[in-house]
Amino acid sequence: MIEGRDDAPTRAYDLEERSALFGEAVIDFAKKMPVTPVTRRLIDQLVGAGTSIGANYGEADDAVSKKDFRHKISICKREAREAKFFLRMLARAVPEFQDEARPLWQEAKELHLIFAKIYRG
């Protein structure tokens, strides 16, 4: 799990907080990346995917029907998978950031597995 602020709950099952912390960690990571013709698009894609997990989870939490909930959870699952992919590509593009990308990749993987389980019911 991504390390949170001192005032943030650390419960792994608090998906709202966990996905928000992941989005914040992605932003912090992206701000450190050198912007080149190769990384520009990868950074944009990572930030988009990494931050939308929490936004879509919030939407799922407020869903008006089971169908709507399931749809929003499927988006969370897809965005977590995309975050994993773009973290891998950035680690390849900027190898000196591989060690820093690894825990983010692991968290994206765990979030993907959690949302996949929720989606399957």
Image: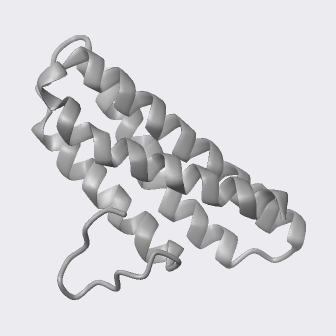
**Residue 19's x, y, as percent?**
45, 64
Q: Is residue 3 above or below residue 34?
A: below
- From the viewer's side, name the closer residue of 76 and 1: 1
**Residue 31's x, y, as percent?**
15, 42
Which residue is depicted at the point 50% across and 46% down? Answer: 109
User: Image quarter for residue 61?
Assistant: bottom right
- Going by the image, does 27 lie left or right of 13? left
- From the viewer's side, name the closer residue of 65 and 89: 89
User: In the image as oriented, which residue stretches furthest toward the top?
Assistant: 37
Q: Is residue 103 above or below residue 66?
A: above
Which residue is depicted at the point 16% across and 31% down? Answer: 97
Q: In which quarter of the image is the C terminus?
A: bottom right
User: Image quarter for residue 94?
Assistant: top left
**Residue 101's x, y, as percent?**
26, 38
- Going by the image, does 74 lie left or right of 27? right
**Residue 91's x, y, as percent?**
27, 25
Which residue is depicted at the point 46% across and 48% down? Answer: 108
Give the total of numbered labels.
0
Q: Quadrant of the N terminus?
A: bottom left
- Going by the image, does 56 lie left or right of 48? right
Q: In this view, does 75 lie above or below 105?
A: below
Which residue is depicted at the point 42% across and 76% down? Answer: 17
